Amino acid sequence: MKKNLIILIFLSAAGSFLFAQTGKFMKNDLHQHTTFSDGTYSLSTMMYMSNKYGLDFWANCDHGGSSARDGFGPLWTTPPFTKDTAWNEAGDSKWWDSYNPNPIKGSILFGKNKHQRMWRWQSIKEYCFPQLVIVRKKYEPKIILQSLEWNMPGHEHVAVTILSKQFCGKPNSDALAEFEYKFDSADNDSLGGNEFGWTKDMKHDHKKSIDALKWLRTNYPYDSYALLNHPERRKRYTASDIREFNDAAPDIIFGHEAIPGHQKYEIKCDYQKGKTEGDCTYGGTGIYLSKIGGLWDALLSEGRHWWVFTNSDCHSVGKANDMSDGEDFWPGEFAKNHTFVKSENNPEEIISGLRSGNTWIVTGDLIDSLDFRINNSVMGSTAMPINGEITIKILARDPQSNNHNTYSDYRNPILDHIDLIAGEIYEKYKPGTPEYSITENRSTKVIARFDACGNSIDSKGLVSKKWIEKPNGIKEITFTIENISKNMYFRLRGTNHKLDTENETDGEGNPLPDDLVKNSAANSFADLWFYSNPVFIKIQ
């Protein structure tokens, strides 16, 4: 393939992107917890902080199963937010069975604290969602979704949202409550659904997880999603499992949390050696994404629409006088999804935007804008070569202001380089064949690198090319590839690290294992990355 570097201008003086596309990229977090499960803070606090850190939409994603705490805590009345209010909220929660009369429905379950536990289906339906509806009004027109961290039978955690009737005239989240009752492996209530005509299979195995996805596909094909959370963490998924999920409901389960939460935790992301695929994270990223030619590339090599996301997984950020000792950042404080949505105030368009694949992910606001397309096709879509040629256009903005780092003086990181990664696409593998378990795409590699100066050489001899510096931190790249003869995909990654940085990157710019150093909030804010989702190329 012959490669040429061509520079064109595609932006205004202010740096706004002028490619024709109706809508906007919206910042979001899809995985955060409250006192309705095992979070430290009330739903009101989490919604306040999600808004404070600039998210455009977000989702409450408390665990399925059961909880003895009522989850309420103080409701927000008037800002400003004060630290002590949030950090003391856990003590404000009451035991569900302390109310008179006892409100708990369904099969009786007592926890280790000797208090009766309320099943999550009931707390979603009757308590959590009604409170969410009240809190939403404070942040209109921003969209707040009721979600669920589903305990997937035979596996681990999955973020599930069913939009149905969440935003109607008399909103409810009954569909999500029914899903939790029927399919959550930690929900062993066999009685509570009777009054609604809900029935369930009490056997929690892999087959039930497939049945659940098919149930979503049948009943809520356009207004639901299921995204794997931290899938490497406990080694509870195989490549064939993920392919089977995607085959069962391709428009429902279409991605995973590739940069997981718990980024402040001493063992970064709680990805513990021996228990985790890859033994740890790499640049804060799970090995499915961080390894070039790894499992994500293997899925893309089939042309699968399988996208990467990031979230906070916020449970606890620390004490009021020392926010660095917790395990989490607030939603939007460190990690963000940037998802293109055609109509920002339309919940259905948000689901469509997530499904489209037009999302890029970033930590520490290393960049705050990205437009990446090939022959004018955007992330998640397919382009066709013109006379055997494709033109790759990239506009990325390195913000010229501080990020949210309050843990060190390193507050305005500099984007060092952007890698263009490419892999070949083959036929989709069939269930029951050896290929269905493939975890690699050996054709995947970095084919070009762009930086401020050009002519840097990596350990494999790849020479970087100079991007064009524009006002307001814009990096502008146009790269043409001729003689395209195979179906392919292209994706991006970028970092603040130079090649071969001690304990951070190797000579090819790949992130090194995070267990080489003890983690902290300051260390996380010093190790920053962004990744794009792919653009596919199809030979006509």
Image: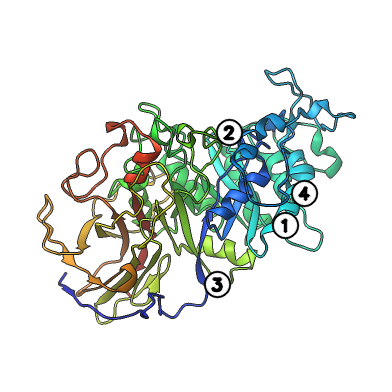
Give the x, y percent position of residue 70: 74, 34
Q: Amino acid at mark 4?
A: Pro
Question: Compared with residue 285, is residue 167 higher up or lower down, i.e. above or below?
Answer: below
Q: Nearer the viewer, residue 17 or 376?
A: 17
Within-10-Å neighbours for mark 1: few <14, some 14–19, many 20+: many
Say which residue appears at 77% left-offset and 39% top-offset: 122
Q: Nearer the viewer, residue 183 or 15?
A: 15
Question: Compared with residue 295, is residue 368 higher up or lower down, i.e. above or below?
Answer: below
Q: Amino acid at mark 2?
A: Asp
Give the Cα distance between marks 4 and 3: 28 Å
Give the Cα distance between marks 2 and 1: 29 Å
Mark closest to the chain's N terminus, 2 or 1: 1
Say which residue appears at 45% left-offset and 43% top-offset: 260
Q: Quadrant of residue 71?
A: top right
* SS label for mark 3: loop
Q: Amino acid at mark 3?
A: Lys
Q: Nearer the viewer, residue 308 or 179?
A: 308
Which residue carries the number 2 mark?
A: 205
Q: Residue furthest right?
A: 101
* SS label for mark 4: helix
Give the Cα distance between marks 4 and 1: 10 Å
Say which residue appears at 58% left-offset and 55% top-offset: 51
Which residue carries the number 3 mark?
A: 342
Within-10-Å neighbours for mark 2: few <14, some 14–19, many 20+: few
Which residue carries the number 1 mark?
A: 166
Mark closest to the chain's N terminus, 3 or 2: 2
Looking at the rendered image, the disc whose residue lies closer to the viewer, 2 or 1, is 1
Which residue carries the number 4 mark?
A: 130
